[in-house]
Image (cartoon, rainbow, N blue to C red):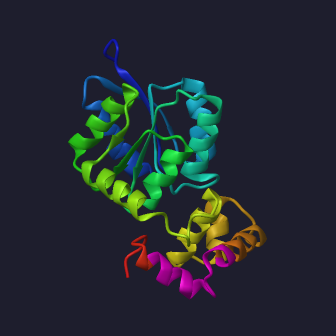
Amino acid sequence: MEAGAICVILADDHAVVRAGIRRLLEDAADIHVVAEAESGEEFCKAYFEHKPDVAITDLSMPGIGGIEAIRRIRIKDEYAKLLVLSVHEDVLFPIRVIKAGAIGYLSKRTAPEALLRAVRTVARGETFLERELAQRIALDGIAGTDDAFKDLTDREFEVFRMLAEGRSVNEVAEKLFLSPKTVGTYQTRVLQKTGADNTAALVRLAIRKGLIEP
């Protein structure tokens, strides 16, 4: 490892994805991956074990998930440099992760060079958002937040997203390491807070906001 290299930990629940990202990062002489994680809990543990210069995480992982992991890390380390790498491109996701404590957000669809630039930017303690996404967030702020989502907690938002993607309560429970009863409770809260009558209405809401494709 090159002296002064940026030490990174990488969290994603797909081993193949982690391997690809790790290869890309370590092809750069100034970046070194010191640990990997595949759940929110493992991400938190790895962070406090290694205290990396930059911590990269996906959002959709088993257990507490990426957003809650970010929140927990930031509570204990206000200087944590957290970068989210996600498939989700709607402004609701970067807005939520920034509020939780991340300072960077990047889509997995962007060019590899953008990830390297993001890691170096976040390592300096600077915020990284792709220009188009930053503009959309600014416009969203001018227009005002969507009342359908503003009262959802991070966990409720995660359950909402997974249900809208067509997962059953049991599938959501398995993915998040929760009981079906607990997921059912979250589902009820989501329906109440969004004003949706049923899961089909949640799907329509998610499509309208661009969270899932029709």
The region drawn magenta spans: 191-206
Which residue does the image show at 32% across and 31% down from the upper left? 121
As drawn, the residue found furthest toward the top would be: 3
**Above or below, comparing residue 128 to residue 7 in the picture:** below
Relative to residue 121, is residue 203 drawn left or right? right
Determine if the magenta segment contains residue 31. no
Which residue does the image show at 48% across and 41% down from the upper left? 102
Q: Position of residue 78 (x, y in %)?
A: 57, 29
Q: Position of residue 133 (x, y in %)?
A: 31, 54
Instruction: Work out whether residue 108 can be spotted.
Output: no
> Which secondary structure dominates the residues rendered in magenta?
helix
Determine if the magenta segment contains residue 192. yes
Q: Where is residue 184 in the image (x, y as percent from the top left)?
A: 73, 74
Q: In which quarter of the image is residue 117?
A: top left
**Above or below, comparing residue 15 to residue 46 in the picture:** below
Choose between 140 and 133: the one closer to the eye: 140
As drawn, the residue found furthest toward the right would be: 181
Relative to residue 148, is residue 211 drawn left or right? left
Q: Quadrant of residue 141?
A: bottom left
Q: Number of callouts in the render? A: 0
Which residue does the image show at 25% across and 49% down from the upper left? 131
Relative to residue 102, is residue 180 drawn left or right? right
Instruction: Work out whether residue 101 can be spotted.
Output: yes
Choose between 120 and 152: the one closer to the eye: 152
